[in-house]
Amino acid sequence: MEIEFQNRKKSCKQCLMHSGIEGIIIDENGLCNQCKSHKAFNPHGEKHLIAILEKAKNNPSAYNALVPLSGGKDSTYVLYLAVKKYGLKVLVYSYDNGFMSQMAKDNIQNALKECGSDHIWVKHDAEMLRKLYRTTLVNSGEICGVCGVGIERSMLKLTEAYKIPIILLGHSPTEANSFSKENIYDPNRLKSILKTNPKIEKDEIKRFFVYPELNFITSFLYTKTGKFGRKINLLYYPENPSDKEISKIIKKEMGWKEPEQYEYTRHFDCKAEPFTNYIREKRIGSSRRLPQLCNMIRNNEISREEALKIYETDSKKVDLTDYDSILNDLKIDKEELKKIEKIPLYVFNENLSKANKIFARVRKLLKAN
Ligand SMILES: [Zn+2]
């Protein structure tokens, strides 16, 4: 009885977080630590954004800004704002991670037509990418780090090549807390995972990382000195309309479409997203969707009941056979999948880059005070 009681998950009374999730503590009043520390999203202010954009417009470059476009909701909305609201001359670019859905590709084409913008595709050799994904999945339980680094490095390269002063990112404030704490984008950690596979050649590492020796400090300095464009989280500045209103705007203005039957996949632009969420449920106890829904509850966008309904309905729709194409693509069999599900958290964290370790220590100190 005692053991059974201890194993039972305690749920937060406000959101959907529970004690089975890494890092979640429910207090005696039934509130989780994330709800307790949650502060309502406070936009930086549109006037600060306009000042940044005006400065970019005065830059002699042919383009005022680089906009990474995945065909998903947030990046499409950012492109809409950049071109149609703020009148910027933008270069749009898309990173084909090998898992882009057809709908995302159609959305990209439609948006480009609406905006009349120049566009560049970045696509690494499919066989090489598969090798990188497979190696990180089998050894660390994650594949998103590869895609994240691929996007980041290619966008820095484009800003350097075209001398573009700013990069307008589509991170949404509702996605806070939804990313893994495993430092999956740390270049040193990623390299050490990839090194476990002798079939990955040095030349491939060079091609993939674009700047093989870049670290957080040099990246910061290159941005300060203007070699790289400065990253701007555009959606953190103005008051944003609700998710539903954003959909409406971009459907009308950008020819944007979204899948009707699934609410689960906010990131329907990536066919691998449901699979990565499945693995996260197994390894961490939570997909990326759950924290997003919890943020929406905390921001009074939906009620706890509504969020729970969405989560349960979507969970029922998830079927392991849905992942077959991805498992086949990466040549993962059922045995291997079981092993991946059991990979502990924070593997390879001893290989974090020095700068990242220092940041972590400073953050800890600041929190303690
Ligand atoms: Zn909570």
Image (cartoon, helix red, strand yellow):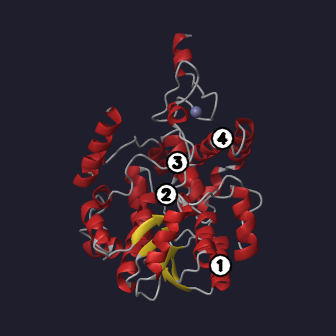
Residue nearest the observer in this picture, 160 or 269: 160
Mark 4, ligand 1, within 8 Å: the answer is yes
Q: CA distance from mark 1 to mark 4?
A: 31 Å
Instruction: For mark 2, give the secondary structure.
Output: loop
Residue 111: give its label. Answer: 1
Residue nearest the observer in this picture, 367 or 51: 51
Q: Residue at coordinates 57% horizontally, 54% vertically from top-left?
A: 275
Tell me the crowding category of disc 3: few under 14, some 14 to 19, or many 20 or more residues within 10 angstroms, Cα based.
some
Q: CA distance from mark 4 to mark 2?
A: 37 Å
Q: Between label 3 and label 2, give the one nearer the viewer.
A: 3
Tag 3 residue: 178
Q: Residue at coordinates 44% horizontally, 78% vertically from top-left?
A: 56
Q: Earlier in the sequence, mark 1 or mark 4?
A: 1
Rendered view: 87 above or below 230 = below
Residue 332: give its label. Answer: 2
Tag 4 residue: 297
Residue 216 appears in the rendering: yes
Q: Where the C terminus falls, by quadrant? A: top left
Residue 272 horizontal side relative to residue 227, left or right: right
Type of amino acid at the residue the image marks with label 3 = Ser
Q: Earlier in the sequence, mark 1 or mark 2?
A: 1
Rendered view: 160 above or below 352 = below
Residue 316: give its label. Answer: none
Q: Earlier in the sequence, mark 3 or mark 2?
A: 3
Q: Residue 305: give x, y in percent of width and height.
A: 74, 36
Assign ligand 1 to one image quadrant: top right
